[in-house]
Amino acid sequence: MSFILPGDPSVPWSSLKDTMDRKVVIIQESNISKQVGFTSEQITEEVYESKKMIKRIQTLKSDLLGDIEAISIISKDTFKPYKHKISTKGSFKKVEYFESFIRLTQGDSENDIKKENPLFENHSVEMVIRLLPFHQGYITNHFAFHPGKEHVINVVIRVVSKEFVKKCGVDFVESWKVEVNFEGNIQFYWISINDKELLKQENILSPDTKMIFERE
């Protein structure tokens, strides 16, 4: 199994394009589906402290799940993390990345966590997988800081198969189905082979329940 670090020369980090996307959110339980909200994503190139960065804004709008906004800022050339902030109704959590430690701020509390290895930010994994050189049998892993768990996890990425997935309306395109294991939390992603777009996502919540994010 290969191991990826930020700035790995085998990955074209700076090729990630600005994009805007919207997906519906569906809860499927015992094969019964119910739409519960929608997500949006905006990826733009910006300059912070004279350095080229990628800013990704994700929003979730849902009466059932609550409204969430997550903002990640990473290096455009290496995907090295810089800042992350996640906001829910009445609360927020901020993560700042330094050379030797990670600063976690929540409300009035502040906690510094020692950083022992180069790593990614967990929310940027969905950008990382759009750039990897996938093929049948591909598998790799990397370290990522998980703001929710407040520690570093090992993330394993594995190509499962090729499938045709809806891109827009009745337009279906060939895609890689990719399994991402966030230390026991399994999620599946479908990445279009030609355009490297994230078309669909499934989060496994229980043996008979999953959350699906897909285009309308």
Image (cartoon, rainbow, N blue to C red):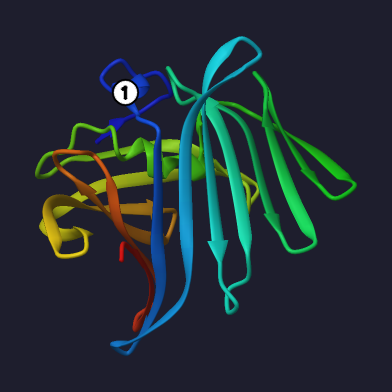
Identify the residue at image location x=69%, y=27%. 101
Where residue 87 sits in the image (x, y, percent)?
Answer: 69, 53
Position of 128 with respect to 193 (left or right) is right
Give the side of residue 208 with respect to residue 145, left or right: left
Residue 170 showing in the rendered view: yes
In front of the other: 215 or 9: 215
- Nearer the observer, 193 or 40: 40
Looking at the rendered structure, the kind of residue marked 1 is Ser
- According to the image, label 1 marks what residue? 15
Q: Quadrant of residue 135?
A: top left
| Image quadrant assignment for residue 157 | top left
Is residue 153 in sight in this rendering? Answer: no
Rendered location of residue 97, percent (x, y):
65, 28
Q: Residue at x 60, y 77 (%)?
A: 63
Is disc 1 surrounded by few (<14), some (14 to 19) or many (20+) residues within 10 Å?
Answer: few
> Which is nearer the eye, 54 or 136?
54
Q: Residue 174 vs residue 101: left or right?
A: left
Whether residue 110 is situated above or below residue 45 in the rendered picture: below
Q: Quadrant of the N terminus?
A: top left
Question: Which residue is drawn at the image coordinates 17% and 40% (left, top)?
Answer: 138
Quadrant placement of the C terminus:
bottom left
**Farthest right residue?**
108
Q: Position of residue 76 (x, y in %)?
A: 45, 21
Decide which of 109, 91 is in the foreground and name it: 91
Residue 77 place in picture, x, y as percent: 42, 17
Element type where label 1 sits in the image: helix
Residue occupying the far top of the picture: 50
